């Protein structure tokens, strides 16, 4: 079967024949039908997220269960599934306190590029090939832990099921679960990509009265209005902090979301919140980067700086809910798919992600 493999950081992926082992105990094989191209994949190519190469990238995907290993009871052959890159264990401290998003077991292997037991299922010429975090969706087939395959209804288009697995749960969850945005709030969103568009529509759904979208691509800023943005700022043309202050009677916003993964934009998010405001960091920065915020302002302005991983969600509960919100017309998922590619065109899809033109590019198998 074919998969797209990153062999060297900074280079294009190579679409090539790759061997895939049978699913082992507690694992399932999935025939991929759709895979979204997310900036987290690009972070690995840029060596910004330190994962070992060679590696099969892709973590936003959906497909059909094709084989199951010993002891699998949650899914069976033929089930349609959306993949989950945080397959929580249910047993660690964080799972027990109701926070499967930061499960110790899943996070232990996330940056190793292996399955939960530390071994790999992909190989080329007998040499191990890693997979991006417990998924590896830029591949015709993949093997994942049982808990990484979340059943979805068969009438859900695979493209939408794929997106729910990363950009939708991450974006909408940051609003609903992490920030808990109240009706009437003011919100700014820095970075209008696949994830940022879902923060925008999540904020609109939560009843925010003002949703300010900030990006550098005018065409995309224009499209954010259809997802609920009330104001837009092009960060190439104006200072986003000053622009937000002038749009909020010099107060700043109640909630600012950073959806890029850079220290400067995280600082901007913090600086554009009002007293009592909250900045939520969704974007993933490199592990060695730090952010500087004014220490006095934290207590004296009663501010919060908070992070959100996988939208603080639980895929088994949230995927069906998010898909129901789409069916009910409250979340727009179809229009997030702005372009589709074949697996052979994966590098074109990544180039478009880098240029910031797409909301979401999706590979169809
Ligand atoms: N100011 C404003 N907008 C910017 C800036 C900047 N300095 N730099 C980049 N952007 C915009 C890009 O134009 C693009 O529209 O940020 C957006 C990022 O979107 P995508 O590349 O589609 O990224 P996405 O997949 O949404 O991921 C965003 O969330 O989950 C994390 O790892 C992911 O860190 C990444 C972030
Ligand atoms: Zn992602
Ligand atoms: Zn756990």
Image (cartoon, grey):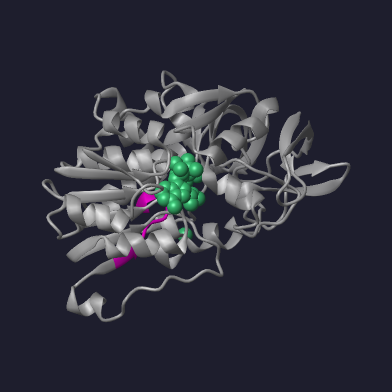
Q: Quadrant of residue 152?
A: top left
The image position of residue 170, as x and y in percent, is: 39, 46
Quarter of the image with the C terminus in it: top right
Q: Is residue 324 left or right of residue 206?
A: right
Write the start and end of the magenta stretch as one range: 305-313
The image position of residue 125, as x and y in percent, is: 88, 41
Tell me what residue is drawn at x 55 percent, y 66 percent: 287
The extreme right residue here reads 125
The extreme top residue here reads 155
Note whether 246 is above or below 41 in the view shown.
below
Whether residue 95 is visible: no
Whether residue 8 is visible: yes
Indicate whether residue 170 is drawn in magenta: no
Tell me what residue is drawn at x 42 percent, y 22 percent: 156
Q: Nearer the viewer, residue 130 or 119?
A: 130
Q: Nearer the viewer, residue 116 or 349?
A: 349
Quarter of the image with the N terminus in it: top right
Indicate whether residue 309 is drawn in magenta: yes
Tell me what residue is drawn at x 24 percent, y 53 percent: 244
């Amino acid at each position: 079967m074919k998969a797209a493999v990153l062999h060297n950081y900074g280079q294009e992926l190579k679409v090539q024949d790759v061997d895939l082992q049978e699913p082992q105990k507690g694992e399932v094989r999935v025939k991929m039908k759709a895979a979204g191209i997310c900036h987290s994949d690009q972070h690995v190519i840029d060596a910004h997220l330190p994962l070992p190469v060679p590696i099969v990238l892709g973590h936003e995907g959906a497909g059909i269960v094709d084989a199951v290993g010993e002891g699998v009871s949650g899914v069976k052959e033929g089930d349609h599934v959306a993949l989950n890159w945080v397959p929580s264990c249910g047993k660690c401290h964080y799972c027990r306190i109701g926070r499967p998003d930061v499960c110790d077991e899943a996070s232990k292997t996330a940056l190793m590029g292996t399955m939960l037991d530390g071994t790999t299922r992909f190989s080329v010429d007998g040499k191990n090939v890693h997979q991006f975090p417990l998924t590896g969706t830029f591949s015709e087939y993949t093997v994942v832990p049982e808990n990484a395959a979340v059943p979805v209804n068969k009438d859900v288009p695979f493209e939408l099921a794929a997106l729910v697995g990363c950009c939708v749960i991450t974006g909408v969850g940051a609003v609903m679960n992490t920030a808990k945005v109240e009706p009437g709030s003011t919100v700014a969103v820095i970075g209008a990509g696949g994830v940022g568009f879902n923060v925008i529509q999540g904020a609109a759904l939560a009843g925010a009265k003002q949703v300010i979208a900030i990006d550098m691509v005018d065409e995309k800023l224009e499209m954010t209005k259809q997802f609920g943005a009330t104001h837009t700022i092009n960060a190439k043309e104006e200072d986003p902090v000053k622009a937000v202050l002038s749009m909020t009677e010099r107060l700043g916003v109640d909630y600012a979301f950073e959806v890029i993964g850079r220290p400067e934009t995280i600082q901007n998010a913090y600086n554009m919140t009002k007293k009592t405001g909250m900045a939520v960091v969704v974007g993933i920065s490199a592990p060695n980067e730090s952010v500087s915020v004014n220490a006095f302002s934290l207590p004296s302005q009663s501010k919060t700086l908070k992070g959100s991983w996988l939208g603080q969600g639980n895929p088994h509960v949230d995927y069906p809910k998010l898909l129901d919100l789409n069916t009910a017309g409250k979340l727009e998922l179809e229009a997030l798919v702005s372009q589709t590619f074949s697996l052979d065109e994966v590098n074109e899809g990544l180039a478009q992600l880098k240029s910031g033109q797409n909301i979401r590019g999706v590979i169809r198998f």
